Amino acid sequence: MMKNSRVWVVVAGALIAVSGCSSGGPAGSATGMAGTSEMATPTGGGAMVPAYAMTLQQQLPEVMKANAIPGVVVLIKSPTRGDWSGTFGTAEIGKQVPMSLNDFLRVGSNTKTMTSTVILQLVQEGKLKLDDPISKFRPDVPNGKNTTIAQLSEMRSGLFSYTFDKGLNATLDADPQKAWTPDELLSVAFRHPANFPPGQEYDYCNTNIVLLGIVIEQLTGMSASEAFEQRIFEPLGLKNTKLPVNTDSALPLPHAQGYQFGTNEETVDSYAVPAADLPAALDGTLNPLNYTDANPSWAWTAGGAISTPDDLAVYVKALVTGGLLDAKTQKLRMDSIRPVAEGQPNGVGYGLGIAEFAPGILGHDGQLPGYSSFMVYNRNTDDTIIVGTNLAASPVDGQNAAVLVAKSIIATLYGASDVPGGNPAAPQSGSPTASG
């Protein structure tokens, strides 16, 4: 997630606890892809559709209706259960415009994994150390001499996240095309005192990752956009993924229109709509705002990337299995994952730009005004799950809309017994990465 929601410390419990939903919902379509599942079912045209897909075709429209989600795309790659992709709902409210697996998405805080990947590549190359203080690169960081590169990547710096600043959010509303610079974002952040001393606890913070973007530019001598392209996108053959420069606010075609209930300033503390407005939001008489064309430069290396479901599937597998790092550095990354709070089930946590949602299920989620996304790779089963939606968050409880869809998918694929129990009280977003 991206803008203002704090970390989802429920993680595994939230992923599996799928709420009961009313029947009906947006019309959906699904495409079965050849797979190896023994439980596949033939369609009228003879194609084999995995058994789990039949369940999801019924469940996902219900989740969408219960949370006012206009459109959803799902891509699942599973060597044992069978591959499947599905599109549901509409790409534009008020019109019958089908969603597409070819649609470009603003992927929000999935970008953070890319930023930390390049940081780890620089560590691997001997150009940087994880225990280097950030003051080495930005002397103006409050308590920067005691704040390390690792603490920034692991969300343990204690710095204030600029996206909670009400003035910044008011500017986003008044001037949605403003091209923000990293220095402007840090200036906003540094006007606020730190939340706690570095290393004391976990707190999801976009300021951390903007600082890492600056480190990347200083050490590579190129823009973060160019560094991502040369170090991640080109090696993996990701032709539809990029980090736009701050003046490039256009989302390439094709894409769905992107929506959010409430302005940026209204959603600083929660994406949930007031209780009095909720019935209208759910029955369609209160429409969300359209954020499709808003400039995402304020998210930069913390959340500004765009991609497609196919590209994300390639990327998240490489992220988790080590396709972009050598074995030693990849192990360092995996070993860095720690619980985001006391009482979390085993196997749930956050590390060097990577989240673990349940044992062996790793990746990230993302959220910007207008869009939300979820990408994971399951090391135990070799499954990849990608979800994209054209709504930032549910008006019901403010959770990332793509995460809500992912809950249903993960429960269907693995069942509640396959993930840790427990459901500690959590902030509104519901992800170990809530804010991007």
Image (cartoon, rainbow, N blue to C red):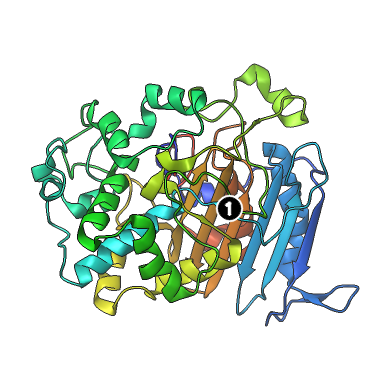
> Is 393 in front, or is 300?
300
Residue 229 is situated, as x and y percent measured from the top left of the image, at: 41, 65
For label 1, the SS is strand
Give how far across and how far down residue 313 sits, in percent.
Answer: 54, 67
Q: Considering the image in quadrants, where does the C terminus appear? A: top left
Residue drawn at (51%, 25%) of the image: 173
Q: Where does the image place residue 221, in percent across and percent down from the top left?
A: 24, 60
Looking at the image, residue 293 sits to the left or right of residue 131; the answer is: right
| Residue projecting furthest to the top | 276
State the residue position of label 1.
105
**What amino acid does circle 1 point to?**
Leu
Left or right: residue 350 versus residue 142 is: right
Residue 294's place in the image compared with 304, above or below, is above
Residue 144 higher or lower than 192, as above or below: below
Q: Choose between 37 and 433: the one closer to the eye.
A: 433
Residue 389, x across and y down, in percent: 63, 48
Q: Is residue 383 left or right of residue 196?
A: right
Q: Check the image and report above or below for 139 versus 355.
A: above
- Any part of residue 205 in sight: no
Identified at 72% across, 79% down, the residue is: 34
Q: Between residue 389 and residue 237, name the one nearer to us.
A: 237
Displayed quadrant of residue 21: top right
In the image, farthest residue toward the front: 247
